[in-house]
Image: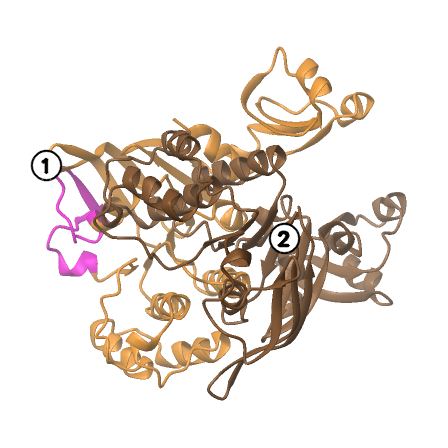
Chain colours: A brown, B orange
Amino acid sequence: MSKIEIKDLTKLYGKTVALESLSLNIEGNKIYGLLGRNGAGKTTLLNLITNKLFPSNGEITIDSETVFENENALSKIYYMSEFNLYPPTMKVKDLFKWTKEFYWDFDVEYASHLSDKFGLKKNKKFRELSTGYASILKIILTLSSNAEILLFDEPILGLDANHRDMFYKELINHYSGKPKTIIISTHLIEEVADIIEEVIIINNGKLMLSDHTESILSSGYTLSGKAEDVDSFIQDKRVIGIDTIGRFKSAYILGSRPLIETMNKHNLEITKLDLQKLFIQLTNS
Amino acid sequence: MSKIEIKDLTKLYGKTVALESLSLNIEGNKIYGLLGRNGAGKTTLLNLITNKLFPSNGEITIDSETVFENENALSKIYYMSEFNLYPPTMKVKDLFKWTKEFYWDFDVEYASHLSDKFGLKKNKKFRELSTGYASILKIILTLSSNAEILLFDEPILGLDANHRDMFYKELINHYSGKPKTIIISTHLIEEVADIIEEVIIINNGKLMLSDHTESILSSGYTLSGKAEDVDSFIQDKRVIGIDTIGRFKSAYILGSRPLIETMNKHNLEITKLDLQKLFIQLTNS
């Protein structure tokens, strides 16, 4: 079980502050969602964890060892980056063997099995793959790496709904068989809401929120109905956002849920908070 | 109100059949979702409608006029393509003026207003824009074109959840003010399910389904609960798919909904069909 500890991490690019005094404990054997707007600092954080960038201040350790130029700590991580760092003319099947030279525990058989499942042709060269299939290849390499820590940066780029569904199912399946520390950075928040146990939100380079998904979603509720009915109910409530469609409204409210009977009487519907809508309300500037 | 009629359309690339005998009537003043897996033929269809490709067989008309080399028919369409066909060193504000030379009804003021709203800097050159902001620019150009028919091909590429939400809201707002014919091709099906009035599904180059969103979603229901409870209930039902998570199951069933009271007695929950899950079940090979 691998833990990542991040202490007072700051990263500057010239005068631009990409990350500011970020501290975070990532305990082992859980699936984390790393959420943030474009430019919030998510990829910078993943690049710092994997020693591809160096912090301006602060420290990152894996199982109490610094990641800074530390082969042993870094070997515990497989990082699916948004960049394609593979030899362009290498065939998929050869990429599996090539990866095994760096990751000794790489499972070539599992990789081959997943290729068949996702319809990835093993005789294709890397540069011949579409955006979607390049993502699928990188997902397969990551899952098959057998590393203790898997980092996914926007894994679903270019995937259609069917392949995204297959990925989420395979990820759960993989994790159930062999618990490990998984971090997924993605913009498709609602699709991963059922998968991630912990939510980390970074906003403008700062840690905004880090909590169990369950606690976050049970901290409030969504109230929907006719605009006037919703308006009169929410007057004394802590409303974090409102969506209006025609004569209907949904209000996102923090606090404990009222009784369903009360709501039925007022023609109002209570549903759970939607993680993506909550995220949007929290991070809209 | 502009209508698109597609008759017996076939497109071959060498020996590969991209579209096969596709016939479709797109009536005016509605929002259509054009859905299909990667490689199903969606972009080929949009390229044929806009005369960027020529059909191997069949015909496409707009308001009864062929689109083939027909300036008048084609001028009614603005097509947000996945390709970036803009001069790379041109600034955003100059792209607005440049577009107005081709689309006389282009609304520069609205484009400028949307740029401020989405945080797109008008002094940036096109090549300096991130993937997300390139999509935002293309969305703004399309909405401001004032064309009678708007075609969006994967408009949300690279957008974070907040910008996607803004896009959907702006689209509804724009459409309510000035109804027109809008076709959105996207892989984020569940996110557009509330926006699109009509669903067109293309599978392996053939038309699989074309119907009102409401009719499709009311043709069945989702049943969730403990695996054994779900299993015993669905024995005589028309099940189009099942998702299993641990000891729980969701079954997607065609047919009319059973009474909620009956379901509560069996500890089963009934919810509406989810368009994305339905799509996945229909198009999984």
> Which label sits on residue A278?
none
Residue B50 covered by magenta stretch: yes
Q: Amino acid at mark 2?
A: Tyr
- For the point 38% across and 50% down, which residue is it? A158
The residue lying furthest to the top in this view is B236
Chain containing the residue with disc 1: B
In the displayed structure, would residue A83 be above or below residue A30? below
What secondary structure is found at the residue carrying circle 1?
A: loop
Do circles 1 and 2 both sit on a common chain?
no
Which of B144 and A104 lies nearest the eye of the viewer? A104
Q: Residues within 10 Å of mark 2 (few under 14, many from 20)?
A: many
Chain containing the residue with disc 2: A
Q: Kindly indicate the quadrant of the structure image that contains residue B266.
A: top right
> Which label sits on residue A32?
2
Image position, residue B76 (x, y; %): 25, 60
The stretch in magenta equals B48-74
Image position, residue A192 (x, y; %): 59, 48
Disc 1 and disc 2 in contact, CB within 8 angstroms: no
CA–CA distance in space, label 1 to label 2: 46 Å
| Relative side of A11 to A133, left or right | right
Q: Residues within 10 Å of mark 1 (few under 14, many from 20)?
A: few
Image position, residue A162 (x, y; %): 44, 37
| Relative side of B32 to A188, left or right | left
- For the point 42% across and 41% down, which residue is it? A140
Image position, residue A211 (x, y; %): 73, 58
What residue would you read off at disc 1?
A: B14
| Relative side of B70 to B232, left or right | left
Asked if one can make out residue A280 in the rendered structure from this viewpoint, the answer is no
Q: Amino acid at mark 1?
A: Gly
